[in-house]
Amino acid sequence: MKRFVNLLLLSTAIIIFTSFKNDILKIYSEYTIDDIYSKIDLESGTLDEDGEEIDFIFTKDKIKAGRYEISIADGPGDLYEIKGTDYYIEFVGYYGYAGYGDEGLLIINSYGTGKFIKYED
């Protein structure tokens, strides 16, 4: 009976460890954030310096320090939209195609900089 209980406990420990290990392995890649921007919508008829009509501009901004579960999508130029917000991020190096959404963890430090850890699909 004691051998059965020990085997049961060992089996349970293996299952728990395997589940935990699978969660750890969901982390795929880490990307350093260069800047954070806010999108500001402009009034209809606003013109840029070339006389072309523009709908919005981006200004540098900060996000409160913390950890955020987010999804990013391709934005204009080198920017990536944090879905569901007016925030956009720019990475230090090449990130690549995010399409309509890559999920991950956004970690912002007290200096307003941070990183994005992309989860494996």
Image (cartoon, grey):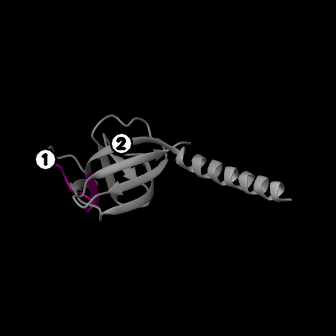
Closer to us: 110 or 48: 110
Closer to us: 58 or 31: 31
Where disc 1 sits, the SS reads loop
Q: Hey, which quadrant is residue 109 in on the image?
A: bottom left
- Which quadrant: the N terminus? bottom right
What residue lies at 64% left-to-right and 48% top-to-bottom? Answer: 18
Where disc 2 sits, the SS reads strand
Q: Which amino acid does label 2 sit on?
A: Tyr
Q: How far apart are marks 1 and 2 (CA)?
A: 34 Å
Badge 1, how many Cα within 10 Å: few under 14, some, many 20+?
A: few
Q: Which residue lies furthest to the right in this view?
A: 1
**37 versus 34 height, above or below:** below
Rendered location of residue 84, percent (x, y): 44, 60
The residue to which callout 1 is attached is 49
Q: Which amino acid does label 1 sit on?
A: Glu
The residue to which callout 2 is attached is 31
Rendered location of residue 102, percent (x, y): 48, 46
**3 versus 26 height, above or below:** below
What residue lies at 43% left-to-right and 56% top-to-bottom? Answer: 83
Please report contact status of discs 1 and 2: CB closer than 8 Å, yes or no. no
Which of pointers 1 and 2 indicates the residue nearer the eye? Answer: 2
Q: How many labels does the image show?
A: 2
Residue 13 lies within the magenta run: no
Rendered location of residue 35, percent (x, y): 24, 49
Query: Which range of residues does the magenta coloring cover?
Result: 36-49
- Which quadrant: the C terminus? top right
